Image: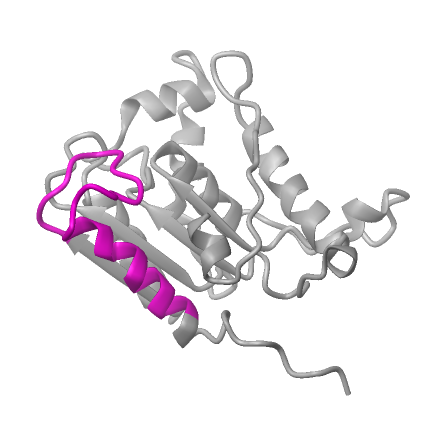
Amino acid sequence: RFLNGLGVAAFVVRYRHAPYYRHPIPLTDAQRAIRIVRSRAESYGLVGDRIGVMGFSAGGHLAATTSTRFDGGNLKATDAIERASARPDFAVLGYPVISFVAPYAHGGSADGLIGKDGDVRLLDELSADKRVTAWTPPTFLFHTNEDNGVPPENSISYYLALRTVRVPAELHIYEKGKHGVGLAPADPILSTWSGRLADWLKTRGLLEAPEPCK
């Protein structure tokens, strides 16, 4: 409803995850969702090059992974959906899990994604801050200093990785607020983060009508 209020079409992705599904199934589902929306953009009345991804906490890790592990589509695929690019055009990450190898890593998310007996080499591979490139989409990040579930260093490390390769990014860290606040409707201070997101979307030109096709 918040996104609709800004004039943004929103889709909820119900992806497969632990304990029944491990990596790469969640990523495959997220990529498929982006391909579906992009391939059907015209019929949905959307703009095909303004398809973003948004995620919170462990979902933030999936959104970051989707932003750093994508392909341009398989042009030889018989399925038209698989011919569409899986690259998000922008990303919004709320208190995201980013690293699985840093001191502030979230072990529970790692266990859920690869299993307690999974290949430890995947921990480095799935640390999104280590996979940022110049092709990673512009990103908005939001976190709180009091977050003891997923420390704000996760957002900071991803922001710094984006900055290193000059990908446009914006980071907001509020002093107060526990993990999992969402839009924080009951907190008059913390709830203002959604306004900062709206401002960022405006700054990126994502809330303006696109130029007519010439």
Residue 113, x across and y down, in percent: 45, 24
Front in this rendered view, residue 139 or 162:
139
x 25%, y 56%: residue: 193
Is residue 197 rendered magenta in the image? yes
- As drawn, 11 above or below 172: above
Q: Quadrant of the C terminus?
A: bottom right
Magenta extent: 174-201
Q: Which quarter of the figure has residue 104? A: top left
Front in this rendered view, residue 118 or 174:
174
Q: How many numbered marks have been drawn onto this rendered protein structure?
A: 0
Is residue 207 rendered magenta in the image? no
x 60%, y 55%: residue: 87
- As drawn, 24 above or below 141: above
Left or right for 102, reference 88: left
Front in this rendered view, residue 62 or 205:
205
Residue 56, x across and y down, in percent: 37, 39
- As drawn, 170 above or below 203: above
x 30%, y 45%: residue: 183
Front in this rendered view, residue 20 or 160:
20
Left or right for 45, reference 55: right
Q: Residue furthest right?
A: 78
Residue 183 in sight in this render? yes
The color scheme shown is one colour
Residue 206, x across and y down, in percent: 50, 70
Residue 119 in sight in this render? no
x 27%, y 29%: residue: 106
Residue 9, x across and y down, in percent: 57, 54
